[in-house]
């Protein structure tokens, strides 16, 4: 079921793109990572669109107050993917993990619209785990639901090894190094042809591997 909310967005390519018929130009602002907590970049502003991923070791993943959950799983490692339209109190604020445990890794990325966005639709969201020593996925993010370009977000969480993507060719990636070698790799892509995007990895070492992704469109 698509997720509909009021948020703003942005891209990291130099001059930005437009999303659908809205004519909204996007720019990537910044990202940050942490262990058991993460601080929203001070360069963020009210109205920016932020995505966040948390990977934890034990307990229940819970929810993050004020953020909308996209996907979550509670199975040995507890992971959650979520987003928020930032308010004026968010830049520079610290977000704690909803369930402090060992091996937590958190990452937040901020995107900025050229003008306010009234709606965002999250589609094709998937979170796929794999057994220890197996590579998860691939997963396919379908982008043809709305007019391009599409904002595609991907994450690969891995315990014990630094995660890598095989595909796609991202516009940008950021690695979060959590506690006790728990990692989260984040990637973002602006897809302009309504072509499905395959998110894959050939890394089969490590344990508690999770591959996830989704498509976001804005009005």
Image: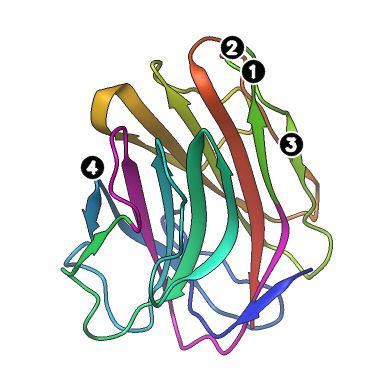
Q: Is residue 40 visible?
A: no
Would residue 159 appear left or right of 219 to someone viewing this image? left
Q: Earlier in the sequence, mark 1 or mark 2?
A: 1
Q: Magenta span covers which residues?
A: 98-125
Q: CA distance from mark 1 to mark 4?
A: 24 Å
**In terms of secondary structure, where does tag 4 sit?**
loop
User: Dot 1: within a 10 Å radius of its alpha carbon, few (fewer than 14), some, or many (20 or more) residues?
Assistant: many
Q: CA distance from mark 1 to mark 2?
A: 4 Å
The answer to whether the residue labelled 1 contacts the one labelled 2, judged by CB atoms less than 8 Å apart, is yes
Q: Earlier in the sequence, mark 3 or mark 4?
A: 4
The answer to whether the residue labelled 2 contacts the one labelled 3, judged by CB atoms less than 8 Å apart, is no
**Does residue 103 show up magenta in the picture?**
yes
- Mark 3 vs mark 1: in front: 1
Query: Looking at this view, is 124 or 94 the one in front?
Result: 94
- Residue of label 4: 35
Q: Earlier in the sequence, mark 2 or mark 4?
A: 4
Query: Residue 135, labelled with which disc?
Result: 1
* Residue at position x 60%, y 81% in the image: 23
**In terms of secondary structure, where does tag 2 sit?**
loop
Query: Residue 139, labelled with which disc?
Result: 3
Q: Is residue 179 visible?
A: yes
Would residue 167 appear left or right of 41 to someone viewing this image? right
Q: CA distance from mark 2 to mark 3?
A: 15 Å
Rendering coords of residue 84 (x, y %): 44, 73
């Amino acid at each position: 079921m698509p997720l509909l909310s009021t948020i703003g967005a942005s891209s990291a390519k130099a001059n930005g793109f437009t999303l659908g018929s809205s004519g909204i130009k996007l720019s990537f602002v910044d990202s940050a990572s942490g262990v058991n907590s993460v601080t929203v970049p001070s360069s963020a502003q009210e109205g920016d669109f932020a995505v966040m991923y948390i990977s934890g070791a034990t307990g229940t993943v819970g929810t993050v107050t004020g953020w909308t959950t996209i996907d979550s799983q509670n199975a040995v490692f507890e992971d959650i993917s979520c987003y928020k339209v930032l308010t004026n109190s968010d830049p520079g604020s610290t977000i704690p993990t909803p369930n402090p445990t060992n091996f937590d890794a958190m990452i937040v990325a901020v995107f900025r619209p050229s003008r306010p966005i009234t709606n965002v639709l999250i589609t094709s969201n998937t979170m796929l785990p794999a057994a220890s020593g197996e590579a998860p996925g691939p997963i396919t993010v379908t982008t043809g639901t709305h007019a391009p370009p599409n904002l595609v977000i991907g994450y690969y969480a891995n315990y014990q090894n630094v995660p890598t993507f095989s595909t796609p060719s991202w516009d940008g990636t950021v690695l979060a190094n959590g506690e006790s070698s728990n990692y989260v790799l984040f990637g973002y892509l602006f897809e302009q042809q309504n072509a499905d995007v395959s998110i894959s990895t050939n890394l089969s070492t490590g344990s508690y591997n999770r591959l996830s992704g989704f498509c976001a469109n804005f009005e």
